Structures are given as C-alpha cells and as structure tokens.
Image (cartoon, helix red, strand yellow):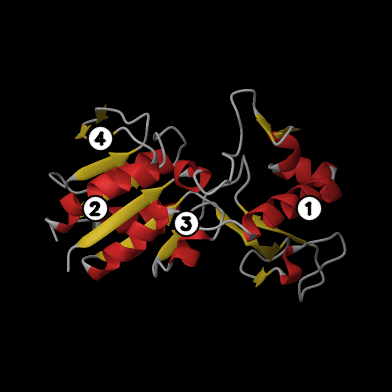
Amino acid sequence: MKKLIVLTGAGISAESGIPTFRGADGLWEGHDVTAVASPDGWRKDKELVLDFYNQRRKAIQHALPNKGHQILAELESFFDVHIITQNIDDLHEKAGSSNILHLHGEIGKARSTVDPTLVYDIKGWELKVGDKCEKNSQLRPHIVWFGEIVPMIEPASRLVAQADILLVVGTSLQVYPAAGLIHEVKPGTPIYVVDPETPAYYGNEKINGIQKPASEGMKELKDILISQA
C-alpha cells in the first residue's frame, strides 16, 4: 500500500462549525490570544485560561465530522493513511481515521505542569484550578501555546519524508513550523493542496491545487487519489 500523508488545518474543522482560532485582529473569541494561549497568559490568570478552554471544549464536544473528514477515513481502504493535524479537536477520530498525529495538542486532554509526559483525558471535559496530576501539580490544557516548542514536529517530519503522496487540506500553509513540513517530501512526490487560498507553488515544490473548501475539494480529489493507489 502506498503511504498517503495528510496535513490538515483549521479549514477542515471550520466546516463542522469550529471557528478558526483567531481573526486578522489577533483575537480568539474576543480574547487577546496572548492572554489565553501563551505561557505568560497562564502565569497571569490560570482561571481565565482554563475557563476559555472549557468553553471551547464544550463547543467541540458536540461537533460532528464533515465529508472532508469522512473521505480521509475512507481512503484507508486504498492507502496507508497517516494524518498530521494542526487542529486540537477530535473530528478525525470521530470520522474513523486510525493514525492521527496532533501537532498542537488535544483539547480533550490535560497534562502536568511539572512533568509533560503525564497526560490525562479530561473527565467531564472540564478542567479547573485545583485539578492536579499524581505529582500534585496543577493540570493545564494539553495544547502547544504561542512561544512554546512543538514537540511533535520531528515525528511529523519523519512521516512526511516517507510519503508516496502528500495531501494538504484546509490550510494555506502560513503557520510555522507546520508549514515547513511540505519541504520534507522526497523529490518528485505528488503534492495536492485543497484550500480556497491554494498557492500554485510553495518554495520549490509544485502544488496540484484545488481552490475549494475541504469537503467540496475532497469529493473532487477522492477519485484522482484512488486512481494512484
């Protein structure tokens, strides 16, 4: 089976009613992103940060995967599919995809503030001040915040380097370090990008672009991909 590596971004989740994380004004649901998504914001007001993610979690909890997610799951019948997602939701899991690497963390999980290897499912999907890990430290959202390293970028790079086909869905390749993953493909690897803002070229890599939203573009691309399986 050929290895199909898929990089997904906010555009695929937006069609399921999950808004992109911030607008051009730098706000996320009315908050300055540095207040709710940075180590400094966490130090200043843990309660604000936890409440912010509790609200996001409630919205995501009831969101359903769309046709874009479903087609990616269906492609497992034809390819060895590995999804690298920039999204913190669980819509790929809900759609039935098997191999998912979350670059920026998972909103349904918490981790220790003293030992990042201690990661837990959030019971009741709500995290509060006073919720502690087994080492008696406060739990924080299992999210990569602005100013933090992206621990999963190296495993993601290794996956992209193994790709027989690279598919990018719902991202215009603007957010680093994730955007740089496209440069890790072997020379000559077919690259398909499904996004309304698809570039014709990205660095030295030629893009096969479909300038449509994720669901619509994936319907068009599915048969093209299967013909290459």
The nearer-to-camera label among 3 and 4 is 4
Q: Answer with mark 2 or mark 3, whichever residue precedes in sequence.
A: 3
- Marks 2 and 3, Cα distance to the nearest angstrom? 28 Å
Q: Are marks 2 and 1 in contact (CB under 8 Å)?
A: no
Q: Is residue 3 left or right of residue 7?
A: left
Q: Answer with mark 4 or mark 2, whichever residue precedes in sequence.
A: 4
Residue drawn at x 41%, y 39% is: 171
Q: Are marks 4 and 1 in contact (CB under 8 Å)?
A: no
Q: Which residue in the structure is indicated by mark 4?
A: 209
- Residue 149 x %, y %: 55, 47
Residue drawn at x 73%, y 60% is: 113
Task: Using a 10 Å C-alpha cutoff, classify the residue at mark 3 as few (fewer than 14 neighbours), some (14 to 19) or many (20 or more).
Answer: some
Q: Which mark is residue 222?
A: 2
- Marks 4 and 2, Cα distance to the nearest angstrom? 14 Å
Residue drawn at x 47%, y 56% is: 152
Q: Please name whichever residue, 199 or 11, is drawn nearer the observer in this view of the structure.
A: 11
Residue drawn at x 84%, y 42% is: 44
Name the amino acid, label 2: Lys
Q: Please name whichever residue, 81 or 153, is drawn nearer the observer in this view of the structure.
A: 81
Residue 169 seen by the camera? no
Q: Which residue in the structure is indicated by mark 1?
A: 50
Name the amino acid, label 4: Gly
